[in-house]
Image (cartoon, grey):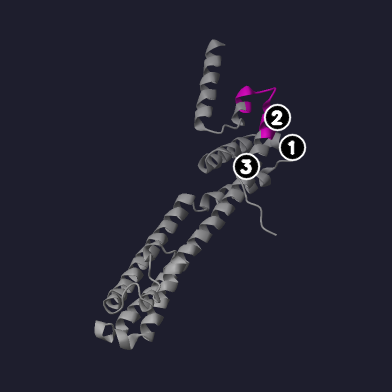
Amino acid sequence: MKKQDVHREYNFPDADLYVQTMEKLRFAQRDIKQFDNYGYDTQKLKNIHNICQKFAKLPTDDELLGTQMITTEKKYEAAEKLKTAIRSVMTRVATKFSNRSGRYRKFGTAKMGDMTDAQLLFCGRRVVRSARQQIDFLAETGLRENHLGRITDACKDFEVALNIQQDKVADRDISVERRVELGNQMYREYVHLCNIGKDIWAETNLAKYENYVIYESNNEQKKARKTREATEKVD
């Protein structure tokens, strides 16, 4: 059965979630006696703290994307080297056979610039096979085994670069999923912690109640603080 896609349960930045959760943990540690009445002891706070630290150590998507981009660039470089090696052979082939002839078309290099990675890889190998089958006819064009060896080596390098790039794409997908799962776990603990904190102080201490209000952005938090300060001045 296909695994269901994992979606974030919160709509603010991961960095804000981490900072706010750590902030609420400090408030909860301050109010640990009150939290204990809800079956929320120091060990539970430590468990949330551990989740936060695991989350903070995960690579960000920018890091993973950067690594993926580097491997993609290397794959492009390997692809260009392979195309150059193929063109070197096909230039010689074109001096012997018309590009409309069956012997030329057998190499299958038409529209090489539009080929997918897989098609380009197979094209390189096909050019080597076809050239070796007609090596006697092509000898007078200056085609030698070292030209075909260059394509063979370029194919190997390109395949390695392609596999590495695909691995990094998969690594990024897995890491993003892991980050979302851990982030959701931290968010659920964060919300639960805040609900308890608000319940504790709802009728006795407005300032401490505000400590546990969840803000989805720094802007919201600033607005709330300004409103609170304005109200205090009026009072």
Query: Could you say which is closer to the camera, residue 86 or residue 157?
Result: 86
Say above or below: 197 vs 7.
above
Taking the image as shown, residue 86 lies to the left or right of residue 23, namely: left
Q: Which residues are magenta?
A: 195-209
Task: Specify the principal SS of the magenta part.
Answer: helix
State the residue at coordinates (25%, 82%): 141
- Callout 1, which amino acid? Tyr
- Callout 3, which amino acid? Glu
Crowding at dot 1, Cα within 10 Å, few <14 / some 14-19 / many 20+, comes out as few
Marks 3 and 1: CB-CB under 8 Å?
A: no
Say above or below: 117 vs 186.
below
Q: CA distance from mark 2 to mark 1?
A: 10 Å
Q: Which residue is mark 2?
A: 199
Label 1 element class:
loop
Q: Which residue is mark 3?
A: 9
- Callout 2, which amino acid? Asp
Query: Could you say which is closer to the camera, residue 112 or residue 14?
Result: 112
State the residue at coordinates (74%, 36%): 37
Taking the image as shown, residue 140 lies to the left or right of residue 148, namely: left
Label 2 element class:
helix
Say above or below: 30 vs 179.
above
Q: Quadrant of the N terminus?
A: bottom right
User: Is residue 142 visible to us here?
Assistant: no
Q: Position of residue 15 (x, y in %)?
A: 51, 42
Marks 2 and 1: CB-CB under 8 Å?
A: yes
State the residue at coordinates (64%, 44%): 45
Q: Kindly identify which numbered label has been placed on residue 38.
A: 1
